[in-house]
Amino acid sequence: MDKFRMIFQFLQSNQESFMNGICGIMALASAQMYSAFDFNCPCLPHYNLAYGLGILLVPPFILFLLGFVLNNNVSMLAEEWRRPQGQRGKDPAVLRYMFCSMAQRAMIAPAVWVSVTLLDGKCITCAFCTSVPVETLGNTSHPGLSQGEMKRVLARIPCKEIYNGQELIANEVAVRYLRCISQALGWCFVLLMTTLAFLVRSLRPCFTQAAFLKSRYWSHYIDIERKLFDETCAEHARSFAKVCIQQFFEGMSTDLASAHCHPPRKAPADVGEAAEKLLGITDQGTMNTALKSWHRCKPPLHLHPPALPSGNGWAGEEQPPTHPPVPRREMAAYYSRV
């Protein structure tokens, strides 16, 4: 149990590792979901295409949205994008960096689903079975059929138990033809995703290193600032609640002491420490005003360092430096009465 607690604390402290773990779990879950999915092609001319492409595209879109939902930085990005300008400007490059980082992680599970689906071949076989080139793969000596009858026969290719067009085109030939195309598309998709991931992760910092470092730094700053603000608010709320409860019980103790003529008890020392942590904000209205001020007008990113000596003088007030006092020498004089 302690090991799992240590792992959980490590993941909480390192958000990037945590999100990478979540993306890996979602990728494995998407592959497992497809293997457990019961694929049933309707084998009808007007429904095969919609069913096959729906299974190929709709679950990846849902997994993509889930990747954003499970990412804690979505609310932070929306808050930074929609907040008022105030005394702190908004850098579009930082917002783009945050969105691209989240989108890259959210695309892992959909890419795994599309790759597994294309390599399996069932969706493409169901969706495009009516487009099999009968003139090339089928029996050209078969008596001619109308266009509607031809599509009805070809639409039953994925359903081997009800297929009745062996004289027109063999079921195994059509399935192998469509599965071969699907697997080729799947490997091309895997190659494309791998190449894009390599270019994004490796080559982008090489061309825009300064802008990349700046965007990454301020993205980390926004994340850390939000965490510290939440921790400070939680600590302030804890101190506020402690003082409020202590004052309630002190009032009850005073009433009981006046009724029974007992001296009231002295407040514990930790309550005084909690009162100091309130930083002068001791009522609900003031706290609401402070929170609104933080949202509407965050402090500028400009720290004021203390005055330091420089080579040409002092950076602060134009006053000479104060040297440490020289220790006094005590001298004793002896006089003789002789």
Image (spheres, rainbow, N blue to C red):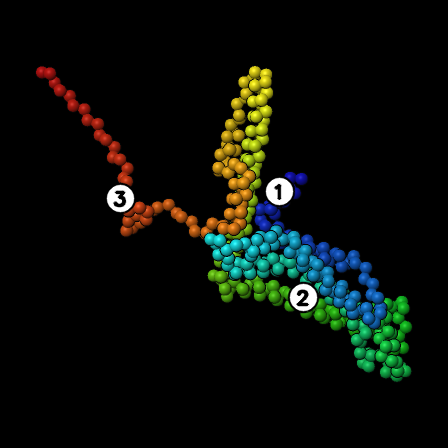
Q: Amino acid at mark 2?
A: Val
Q: CA distance from mark 2 to mark 3?
A: 70 Å
Q: Nearer the viewer, residue 276 or 49?
A: 276
Looking at the picture, how far across and down is residue 58, in whole percent?
73, 62
**What residue occupies the far left of the structure in this picture?**
338
Left or right of residue 179, residue 200 in this image: left
Question: What label sits on residue 6 in the rendered view?
Answer: 1
Q: Which residue is mark 3?
A: 320
Asked if residue 172 shows in the view, the reply is no
| 37 in relation to 165, above or below | above
User: What residue is pinned by disc 2?
Assistant: 190
Q: Position of residue 11 (x, y in %)?
A: 61, 47
Is 96 placed left or right of 156 in the picture? left
Separation of residues labelled 3 and 1 (CA atoms):
55 Å
Q: Amino acid at mark 1?
A: Met
Depth order, front residue of 323/14: 323
Circle 1 — which element?
helix
Q: Give the mark nearest the N terminus, 2 or 3.
A: 2
| Residue drawn at the location 65% of the way across and 43% of the way down | 4
Kindly state the secondary structure of the residue where label 3 is placed: loop
Residue 319 vs residue 136, the one in the foreground: 319
The relative height of residue 109 versus residue 150 in the rendered view (above or below) is above
- Residue found 59% across the figure and 50% down from its top: 15
